[in-house]
Structure formats: C-alpha cells, structure tokens
Image (cartoon, rainbow, N blue to C red):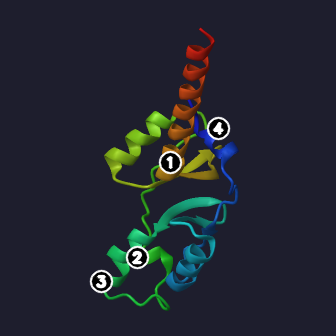
Amino acid sequence: MISVKTILEQKAISTIYNVSPDTSVIDTLHLLAEKNIGAVVVLDGEKLVGIFSERDYARKGIIQGRKAKSTPISEVMTPRVFTVSPDMSIQECMGLFSSKKIRHLPVMEDDRVVGVVSIGDIVNSIMQEQKQHIQFLEQYITQS
C-alpha cells in the first residue's frame, strides 16, 4: 500500500507554494500560472489558515464580481481545509477527494505543512504501481 510520504518523496516538485491571507488574488493567480499549479496553501506565519484554487476564484471571485487586484485571498480562499498525514494511504486520500469533492490535500506533520498532494499525484502513483505489477506478471509468465 502506497503512503502519502512515498508520493511526496517521488514528486518532482517538493516546494510548498504558499501565500499569506493578505496576498492579492491577482498575485496568487500569477503564482499559479507561473508555477503551473492548481492550488496554493494559505499560511499565516506557519499556521495553515486556508487553501486557494482556481476553482475558488471562479466561484467566489469572478461570479461574485470581486476584482482580482483589490481582493485579498482571505476573502475567496477555502478556510476549512481537509488535510492528510504522511502515513495515510492513497486509498484514504482518494476517499477524501471523492467524498469532499476536492482536488488538493495539504500534508500535515506536527501542525506544519510538509507538502501538498493532488488527485493527479494519486492517479499517477496508482498507474505507476499497476505498471510495476504488469511487468512483474509478464516476467513471471515468461519465466514459467
């Protein structure tokens, strides 16, 4: 069973992109575009206070007529953040993604954000594991 810790160790990007609650929406959108990511954690110092995704801006920004240049992230972020720990399994993550209808999960250890996993990270990990199983079975069959 693959753990969140394993996924974090295998990720090409280990940087935790974050903004503060008073960062403007436009600056945060620029960060998302520049880093080609879909979400950032919102930290007040080292404390996790929210998460912001492109979906948040679409639903709470544009539709409600907020201006990206003058709106702070704190007004459009999701303040109730679902998190996981490094020892959780990818199956548990998939359950959260499905039941909570979310796409990103901050990884917490000792009340500190140590990473972020996305639904894409989980799917890639599952595909990699299946590929390894297929290779093993092919080797087993050809050696028999």
Measured Cα–Cα span from mark 3 to mark 2: 9 Å
| For the residues bearing labels 2 and 4, Cβ distance under 8 angstroms | no
Dot placed on the residue nearer the N-terminal end, 2 or 4? 4
Label 3 or label 2, whichever comes before in sequence order: 2
Of the image marks 4 and 1, the number of the one nearer the N terminus: 4
Q: Amino acid at mark 2?
A: Tyr
Q: Quadrant of residue 55?
A: bottom left
Residue 60 image offset from top left, x and y in percent = 34, 76
Give the numbered dot on residue 83.
1
Residue type at mark 3 is Gln
SS of the residue under disc 1? loop
Tell me residue 111's x, y (percent).
62, 48
Q: CA distance from mark 1 to mark 3?
A: 27 Å
Q: Residue at x 57, y 59 (%)?
A: 48
Marking on residue 64: 3
**Residue 30 picture quarter:** bottom right
Of labels 1 and 2, the one closer to you: 2
Q: Nearer the viewer, mark 2 or mark 4?
A: 4
Q: Name the residue: 55% across, 74% down.
A: 21
Task: Tell me, yes or no, whether the two marked residues, 4 and 3, touch with CB atoms within 8 Å.
Answer: no
Mark 2, residue position: 57
Q: Crowding near pointer 1: few (<14 within 10 Å), some, many (20+)?
A: some
Residue 6 is tagged as: 4
